[in-house]
Image (spheres, rainbow, N blue to C red):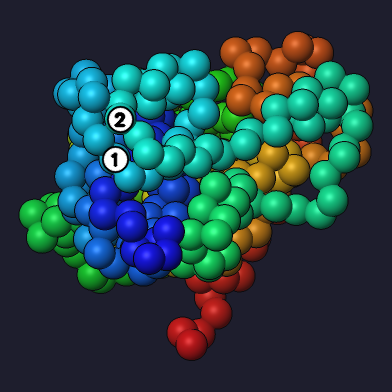
Amino acid sequence: MTEQQDIRSVLVVRLSAIGDIVLTTPVLTELHRALPQARIDYCTKAPFAPLVASNPAVASVVTPESITPGTAYDLVVDLQNNRRSRALVRKLDARMVRRYHKRNWKKVLLVRFKINVSDGYQSVVERYGEALAGLAPKVSAPCALFPSPQDRAFAAGALGADSPVLALCFGANHFTKRYPTERFARIIELVTAATSASVLLLGGKEDEPEAEKMISSLPEAARSRVQSLAGKASLMQSAALLERSTLVLTNDTGLMHIASAFGKKLFVIFGSSVKEFGFMPWGAEYELFETEGLRCRPCSHIGRGSCPKGHFRCMMEIAPERIASRIIETLKQPPQ
């Protein structure tokens, strides 16, 4: 019997966070295709379970707290590969373990010494896929999310179908990944003045104050076209809202990857982030806005709480008018 035919139970481990988990979904698709006889479980932290719970490739979702030590798996695919995930895997009865290799030394060279040793762009999805070498073909599947009928009904009720919708994902976990609120407001003002589009603000509870600040700074004509569901929609309701949106303007955040799962045209703003880290949208059309040629960029591979140089040029030199003009041009293009 071949190795693939022997595999009847699989556990995929990715504990966090939103974008990283969404980027594992192409691997789930390829595993399911290559091992149709196998039961595939997924281990993640409870807040992120909805991202994979409805995936047809996944039989069940477990958390680090709920998985039973000694549980037997023919194959464990550790796509986190940190201290906690390795400790979790050691407690299982795993016949075979495959791991994602982070190659953090490349990030260190790029962040600390600005030495880029990457041989062209490689997505983290492709690096996840390397863990399946010999078990599944090269990963080519798109990201995949499956909002429930209830999630989609929520989105339909919130948005309707009267005008194009620009979804704006304006939050991020770290300051250096967040385009300034007043600049997002300027984009909204320009886009609503030049098109019939409405604007949907999406984010978590922590983003509500900035959403209110953004809306209150707008002139009345623009304000009437903006709706904020930041902090008011669940993770999968937000996914359903992005599914119904026309275009998406986004920082480097988990919602960017959720939008990519629905093939949306993305307008992506990178501050301290750089594409060499491998976290560009997978399988979706996008335009990247960044300030090239800064010697201080990237200053971190995950983001910082403030600009270490104090000038924040990586974001401040991206003109909102430049972004708005591309969104307006795209919205005015005839449907294909």
| Callout 1 crowding tier (Cα within 10 Å): few <14, some 14–19, many ≥20 | many
Indicate the quadrant containing the N terminus: top left, top right, bottom left or bottom right. bottom left
| Callout 2 crowding tier (Cα within 10 Å): few <14, some 14–19, many ≥20 | some
Q: Secondary structure at mark 2?
A: strand
Q: In the visual, does 276 lie left or right of 31?
A: right
Residue 110 in picture, x, y percent from top left: 83, 29
Q: Nearer the viewer, residue 236 or 137?
A: 137
Residue 129 seen in the figure? no
Label 1 with label 2: CB-CB less than 8 Å: yes
Q: Residue at x 48, y 87 (%)?
A: 336
Residue 5 seen in the figure? yes
| Relative to 204, residue 77 above or below | below
Q: Nearer the viewer, residue 196 or 175?
A: 175
Q: Residue at x 78, y 36 (%)?
A: 317
* Residue denoted by label 1: 73
* Residue denoted by label 2: 93
Q: Nearer the viewer, residue 193 or 4?
A: 4
Amino acid found under the numbered disc labelled 1: Tyr
Residue 213 in picture, x, y percent from top left: 41, 26
